[in-house]
Each structure stands twice: as structure tokens, then as C-alpha cells.
Image: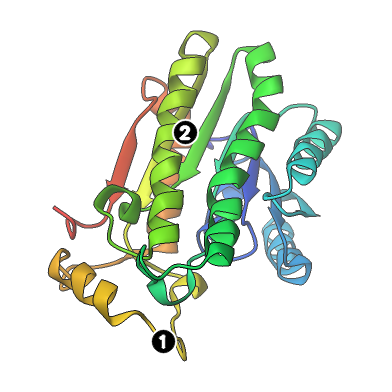
Amino acid sequence: MKRLKGKTALITGGNSGVGEATAMLFAREGADVVITARRGEQLKIVAEKIKAEGGSVLAIRGDVSNPDDSEMLVSRTLETFGKLDILVNNAGVRDEGLRPVDKVTDSEIDRVVGINTKGVMYCTRAVLKDMLKNKKGVIINVASSAGLSGGGGAAYVASKAAILGITKHTAIRCAKSGVRCNALCPSMIKTPMADTTGEIMDSDIMESVMAHSDLTLPVCSAQDVANSILFFASDEAAPITGQCVALDYGSNL
């Protein structure tokens, strides 16, 4: 039996990488999938892939850093499918150059925190109105091992560490209401966001990251992360809430 049959899932950042892999996997497992991202053309390509496999999908262009868009995404999902069972807060950006706290700019802080942290809060707030009323639902936040270890650019680390606090807060808030919330913390993932070609990386922070990580171990693929998201979205993970789980092949032990 398909693990998500009869479920409806909203996946942010669904146009590439982890979001695309998760959307494809959820559709194969029987879910009605809603994908959203700022890049509409790439979103359409992913939607066509899902439809070609016989999946059910709705693609909506939106910006999660805009609270009005977050409300719109939930409203459109409910209008189309009548319910919303799973939210995957996956949309995210990396800071340019991995600048440390003494070098990061105001604009970079605003950009990264706006999408990575505020976007999670806006979408969670919007979806909980329905989930708390129905006393059921699953929220999965895609954070990062950088939020656990501190290894990375200051804006990115701060934005992902904040997600861990949001996750635990949401789990406590919703524990008696049948809504569970967990965070997954992948290390570097083989996705377009990890591509630093032509980018000048801060040498100080790069040296620090290399000194505190085992770079000889495997890195996660988008499919690795999607498979883990599927487990936490499924009924098999029903007892699990408020957890922040590292997906790093042991590189940050």
C-alpha cells in the first residue's frame, strides 16, 4: 500500500533539489502534491514530470518570505484538495561567500533570514489554522547540520538554527492537538544550491568548517533527504515529534 495515499502535501521550494525529489516521491506514494517556488518556469517542469508518472500535482508560484503568499498557498491547497495533511518547509537559500559574523552584510542577513526563517514561520502559522482545527497534521522543516554545528556562513547558520527552535516550539504547542513537527538537518547536499562555481568563498570560515568536519565521508543526495522526509511524513513516524535529526553520514560527530 502506498504510504501517503489519501494525503495532501504542500512542499515549498519544490522546483529543484530536495523539494523536487520530495514532490516526486510523495506523488509516487499516493499524495496529492502542491509545489511552490519563486521560479515559475522550473516549477512547471517539475509538475509535468509528476503528471507524466500519473501523479496528482498543483504548481503555484509564490514567495514564502511574503506572509500574504504563505496564506495564499494554504488557501489554494484547501480550495483545490479540500484538506492539507503535510507541510514540508523546504524553501531556502545559502548566503553568498559563506561570510562569518564579522563580515556579513545587513542585506544578506535580511535576504537569508527572510526566506529560511521567516518563510518557515509564515507557512507554519498559515497551515496551523487548519491543522489545529482538524486535530491532525504533519510539519517537516528542512534545516541544516550548519544549524547544529555552526559550520557555515553566519546568516545561513543563524537562519537554520532558528528553525530548530521553531520546530521544538511548534511540537510543544501542538502536542495535544494531534499535530507533530520535526526538523531534518542535512549536511552538504548535491543540489544546485551547493554549487559555488565562480563564487569567492571566505577563506577563514572555510578553514574552520574543514577543521570541524570529516570531509572524507559521503554527502547527502537530494534523494537521501527526500527518503527521510517521507518517513517523517508517514504514519510510521506517528510517535515522533519535536526532534531535530542530523542527516550527515557521521561527518559532524
Q: Is residue 109 visible?
A: yes
Residue closest to the far right: 79
**Element type at mark 1:** loop
Q: Nearer the viewer, residue 209 or 171?
A: 209
Q: Nearer the viewer, mark 1 or mark 2?
A: 1
Residue closest to the far bottom: 198
The residue pinned by badge 1 equals 200
**Element type at mark 2:** helix
Q: Quadrant of residue 218?
A: bottom left
Q: Quadrant of residue 43?
A: bottom right
Disc 1/disc 2 C-alpha distance (Å): 32 Å
Q: Nearer the viewer, residue 141 or 229?
A: 141
Q: Position of residue 246 (x, y in %)?
A: 28, 47
Q: Position of residue 179 (x, y in %)?
A: 53, 20
Residue 155 vertical placement versus 138 (above, below): below
- Using residue 36 as the reference point, say whether residue 186 is left or right of it: left
Instruction: Kindly identify the residue that appears in the image at 73 percent across and 67 percent down.
Output: 39
Residue 245 vertical placement versus 57 (above, below): above
- Using residue 110 as the reference point, say whether residue 235 is left or right of it: left
- Using residue 66 as the reference point, say whether residue 103 is left or right of it: left
Q: Amino acid at mark 1?
A: Ile
Q: Residues within 10 Å of mark 1 (few under 14, many from 20)?
A: few
The residue pinned by badge 2 equals 166
Q: Residues within 10 Å of mark 2 (few under 14, many from 20)?
A: many
Q: Position of residue 44 (x, y in %)?
A: 77, 65
Q: Nearer the viewer, residue 154 or 136?
A: 154
Instruction: Kindly identify the residue that appears in the image at 60 percent across and 52 percent down.
Output: 114
Instruction: Kindly identify the residue that appears in the image at 26 percent across and 56 percent down.
Output: 248
Q: Position of residue 231 (x, y in %)?
A: 41, 38
Asked if marks 1 and 2 touch (Cβ < 8 Å), the reply is no
Q: Amino acid at mark 2?
A: Ile
Q: Name which of mark 1 and mark 2 comes first in the sequence.
A: 2
